[in-house]
Amino acid sequence: MQTPEQNHPQQIANAPLHSGLSADKLPGIRHIVAVGSGKGGVGKSTVSVNLALALQHLGARVGLVDADILGPSIPGMLGIPTSVPPEMTSDNRMIPAERHGLKVVSMAMLTGDDNPAVLRGPMVGKYLKMFVGGVEWGSLDYLILDLPPGTGDTQLTLAQSMPLSGVVIVTPPQAVSLKIARRGLRMFQKVQVNILGMIENMRTFTCPHCGESTDIFRHGGGEAMSLELGVPFFGALPLDAEVVACGDEGRPIVAKDPMSVSAQVYKTIATALVAQLNEAVTVLKPFVWQWGSNEGAPEWVDGAARPAGSQTTPIGFLRRDPRTLSILWEDAHRDDLDVRDVRLACRCALCVEEMSGRKLLDPKTIRSDVSPQKIVSIGNYAIQFDWSDGHNSGLYSFKDLRALGASAGAKGAEDV
């Protein structure tokens, strides 16, 4: 059994990897959209492929990443041969395969169809970052990421290191699948990745012989859940045997039969996705902020403040003075945090016992002049500090920072 490194050692060794991809490091890509689900077997990869083709039919330039590193399936669905490894540019960036007008990368292009990728979690994250940031994509309107099922390493790597425009959740209408899809959706909400919408797959089967329709997996569960959670509902796809046959042939339904019922539904979903992306605005760009020199300081977008805005979405960070971090929230509230208080509030495993929540950090061990050296944005939900005392393992979620501001404000009121 060969690992990807054994198959193509020079390519993997030289491929550029980025621990914190930002919009500036992905030139020419307008939107990165993940397609996820809580469990396997819901048709997510089929949806990803046909959604990408439907976006292309709308006139967009589209790339597709098979982000299921351990279980890649996209090349087979698109009829892309995997016997020849991808070519590399002079600066060691992977050149994506092209089929039906889509640019595509997949682990199957490195391992072949029959060789499993036997990888631990950190290596899965490494390849995922390479497939996004180490590929010569050119100019794209949309880069679609077909995720593996679940809420594990791949999803967390995406949320923390890539400038996602949002995620689309795919689910069948049956109750068990809906419960698991809800967990996947909640995970993305927890790390503040925008939920662009939901797609209900395999809703109704219509017999091609008698014309009778049967709801094999029940009916309308995805639509009901989207209404309950306040998430846009993009549409319901029928259970269509021709969709499966087209995927097995390497010619997805949108490419082979663009006038079919299923293909038309995909185009409707693609139109809804484009409209939702046009409304979704990420105020702050990813940043790497050198505290002492203020180099790389993030924006302070006070024009985005509104009374009904989110209490945990920052629209500005500011070094008010060497000892004060100011945060402006979307609801127009401002917190001025003493940086030593921020250091003491670290919730990493070195500072707080994970199971009990008992504090392990002794405030007496933290110098009064401790200060940040570097602050880095982590996805859309947190920031990370490199501290002058050498500590750098804590992630500060925006929710925790808002709570810290409230605590500091209450303490200040008591002192007065």
Image (tube, rainbow, N blue to C red):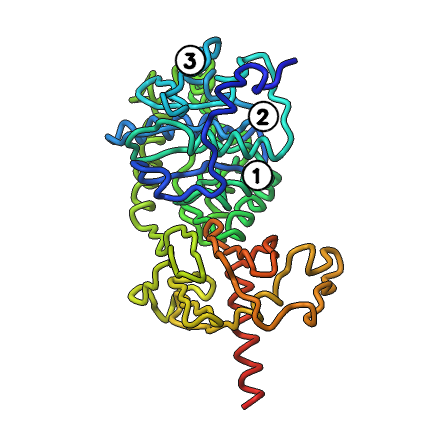
Q: Tell which circle, 3 or 2, labels the residue nearer the N-terminal end.
A: 2
Look at 62% across and 34% down and name the residue there.
Answer: 121
In the rendered structure, the answer to whether residue 365 lies left or right of residue 332 reads right
Q: How many numbered marks, from 0 up? A: 3
Q: CA distance from mark 1 to mark 3?
A: 27 Å
Look at 32% across and 63% down and name the residue there.
Answer: 301
In the rendered structure, the answer to whether residue 306 lies left or right of residue 69 reads left
Three-letter amino acid code at the position of disc 3: Gly
Say which residue label 3 marks: 79
Outermost residue, top side:
83
- Judging depth in this view, the residue of 27 and 319 nearest the camera is 319
In the rendered image, is residue 212 in sight? no
Contact between labelled residues 3 and 1, with CB atoms less than 8 Å apart: no
Mark number, residue 70: 2
- When the figure is inspected, residue 401 is found, relative to residue 75, above or below; the finding is below
Residue 342: image quadrant is bottom right
Outermost residue, left side:
59
Q: Tell which circle, 1 or 3, labels the residue nearer the N-terminal end.
A: 1
Task: Measuring from the top left, give residue 43's x and y in whole percent.
Answer: 50, 28
Look at 47% across and 63% down and name the residue there.
Answer: 312
Three-letter amino acid code at the position of disc 2: Leu
